[in-house]
Image (cartoon, grey):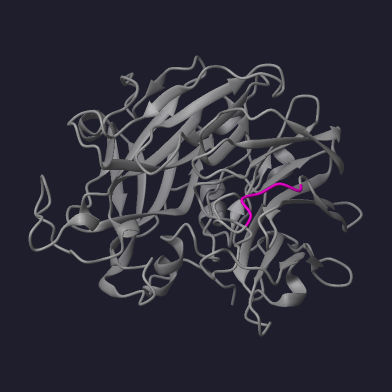
Amino acid sequence: MRRSPMKTDGKTWLLGAAAVLFAVTAVGRLAAEPKTASAAERVELPSPALEHAFAENRPGKVGDGRYYTPFYGYVISPHAVVAEGKVFCAFQNAVGQPIVMAYDVAEKRWAGPVKASEQGLGGRDAHGNPSLCIDSKGYLHVFYGCHGGAMRHTRSARPYDIAAWQEQEPPTPRATYPQTMRMADGTICLLYRAGGHMEPWSLRTSEDDGRSWSPAEKVIEMRLDPPDRLAAAYCQFFPGSGDETIHCFWNHKDDNAARVSETQPHPWRPLKYPGLHEAVYRYNVYYICRDAQGAWRNAAGEEVKLPVSKAEADDKCLVYDSGDEFAFLGSRQAADGEDRPCFRFGTGVVDWAHVSKRVVVPPRDKFARFESGGWRISDQMPESWPPEVVRVMAAEGEAAYGDEEARGWFIFCRQTPWRPDGGGTVFLYHDQAGYATREGGPARTN
């Protein structure tokens, strides 16, 4: 049977909730007018093994003793873009440098690995892995190497060619978690958190293929209303059908919660589950969309005031109120042929960032889609969801970006259980053809 990473046994959400863990859950995006792949057409994907991987990170450790992850999670994307008959893939190696490889679909042959840069975050932490974009002229762009500081940017020396790279000026002086995409008109959109935990999520655009960038537009700023200096957000952005819109789901990260003690209560809510790791206190699911004219709107089409505050989010953008429990993002998201967003997320109480991985309230799947003027939340995937959406929801990894060639390509990484010193492996597959393996086995990336 084909492995599904989304079984609701509690273990999967321990992985999917944590952006820093090896098992990266899918942040699916569908190309325009995707071809439907029925369950019968999809291959039965064997459980990931070393021979299925195309790249491997080992050894090398970050400063706190953890291995660098090839991906950091749903807050950095995409890791694969399809163009000119090739699947271009980007991830970080075991010492935090951006690595690019390319798979020729017709020849079934890998090129690389190539270091897009000698730079990276070094031994500081694992947040710096790359987001990949291809501009209107075919040049590849990698955005990487930031955790509150300047975002690094490097560009391929030739279109659709990974052999040589040229360092570019930082597109923004303070950033974490780059998420990039090229829109239908050629504009590159670069979304990111503008610094540390509580900084606003912002957008810069380039209309000249990454040579210059617009001033930052603050999109989500949860500290403003009501005033709360410890209110934050974690966001997932992805392009809509036809590459004309940008969808965004996010949750509220409450940094007040980790400071609660017997002598210091929570400033504005009773905290039902104190004493957990600070990273896990993430509540609710919210949604907005950037239309083709650049206005940000809620699911009902009402324009929202930027930057979106906590009060504005609760009033106009709420998809799901998780109450005292947590909302786990980083699962699956896709837009259907009518550009309606579909989202799979989890709820429960799991101390996934602590070494114990303690399960307080077992996690459960939820499925959300905006229908008939409101968000419909289901415990099972609705049978009415179109096959192109189901294709992404059933995938093992995150969907590749690109035009119609991207249909069915997915990428993911796993912690390496086959090596005594650990590390991580990266896999690419097509849901009708199986793994894109590399002759000679996975490439060593450092």
Q: Is residue 215 above or below residue 27?
A: above
Image quadrant occupied by the C terminus: bottom right
Residue 10 painted magenta: no
Q: Position of residue 340 (x, y in %)?
A: 44, 35
Camera-side residue: 283 or 265? 265
The secondary structure making up most of the magenta span is loop
Left or right: where 151 falls relative to 200: right
Q: Position of residue 195 (x, y in %)?
A: 45, 37
- Span of residues in magenta: 118-122
Camera-side residue: 357 or 63? 63
Q: Position of residue 286 (x, y in %)?
A: 32, 39
Does residue 336 appear in the picture of this structure?
Answer: no
> Which residue is at 52% across, 54% downward?
73
Quarter where residue 374 is shown: top left
> Which residue is at 57% across, 73% downward?
3
For the view shown, which residue lies furthest in the bottom direction? 420
Q: Position of residue 112 (x, y in %)?
A: 85, 54
Image quadrant occupied by the N terminus: bottom right
State how many labels appear.
0
For the view shown, which residue lies furthest in the top direction? 293
For the view shown, which residue lies furthest in the right direction? 107
Q: Is residue 95 above or below residue 291?
A: below
Left or right: where 304 falls relative to 330: left
Does residue 223 appear in the picture of this structure?
Answer: yes
Quarter where residue 14 is shown: bottom left
Q: Is residue 283 above or below residue 338?
A: below
Quarter where residue 275 is shown: bottom left
> Which residue is at 24% across, 37% downward?
229
